[in-house]
Image (tube, rainbow, N blue to C red):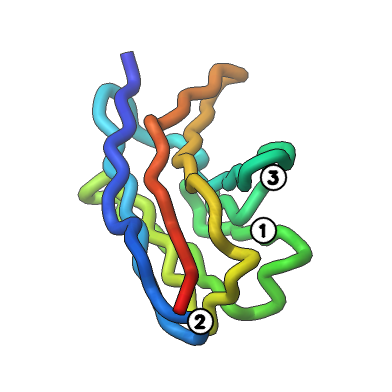
């Protein structure tokens, strides 16, 4: 069974930065990424990265976020810069392989002055 453990959320001021981490256990070779869900909105893709390093980002990212991974640690990172109040959401780690998907519990990111 794949388990995902997220960390790194919190409260930052607009324009600030945060780094989220998600460590996977129980499997390797996963495509991993992040989704987010703001109150009253649907969950949306933030970014994902394959085992070979191919990345894809949601349109709203516009160069502000960078996803990366450490395959030896089975961990994915999301570096978020120039954060805006509209980035406030619960950020969920997602992993998938062989048609099965797994979700983390979510970590709250709040952007406010």
Comparing marks 1 and 3, which lies closer to the viewer?
A: 3
Question: What is the crowding at mark 2: few (fewer than 14 residues within 10 Å), some, or many (at least 20)?
Answer: some
Callout 2 secondary element:
loop
Q: Considering the image in quadrants, where does the C terminus appear?
A: bottom left
Quarter residue 57 falls in: bottom right
Quarter residue 70 falls in: bottom left
Q: CA distance from mark 3 to mark 2?
A: 21 Å
Callout 3 secondary element:
strand
**Where 57 sits versus 113, above or below?**
above
Q: Residue furthest right?
A: 59
**Where 7 sits versus 55, above or below?**
above
Comparing marks 3 and 2, which lies closer to the viewer?
A: 2
Q: Which label sits on residue 44?
A: 3
- Left or right: where does residue 68 sit relative to residue 21? right
Q: CA distance from mark 1 to mark 2?
A: 24 Å
Q: Earlier in the sequence, mark 1 or mark 2?
A: 2
Q: Which label sits on residue 14?
A: 2
Q: Nearer the viewer, residue 98 or 34?
A: 34
Q: Residue furthest left?
A: 73
The residue that appears at 48% across and 34% down in the rendered structure is 95
Kindly identify which residue carries mark 1. 56
Dot 1 and dot 3 residues touching (CB under 8 Å): no
Q: CA distance from mark 1 to mark 3?
A: 13 Å
**Where 112 sits versus 89, above or below?**
below
Q: Considering the image in quadrants, where does the N terminus appear?
A: top left
């Amino acid at each position: 069974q794949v388990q995902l453990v997220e960390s790194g959320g919190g409260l930052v001021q607009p324009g600030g930065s945060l780094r989220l981490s998600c460590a996977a256990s129980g499997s390797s070779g996963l495509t991993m990424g992040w989704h987010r869900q703001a109150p009253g909105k649907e969950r949306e893709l933030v970014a994902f990265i394959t085992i070979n390093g191919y990345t894809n980002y949601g349109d709203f990212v516009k160069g502000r976020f960078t996803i990366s991974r450490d395959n030896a640690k089975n961990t994915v990172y999301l570096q978020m810069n120039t954060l805006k109040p509209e980035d406030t959401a619960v950020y969920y780690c997602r992993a998938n392989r062989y048609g099965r998907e797994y979700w983390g519990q979510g970590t709250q990111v709040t952007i406010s002055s």
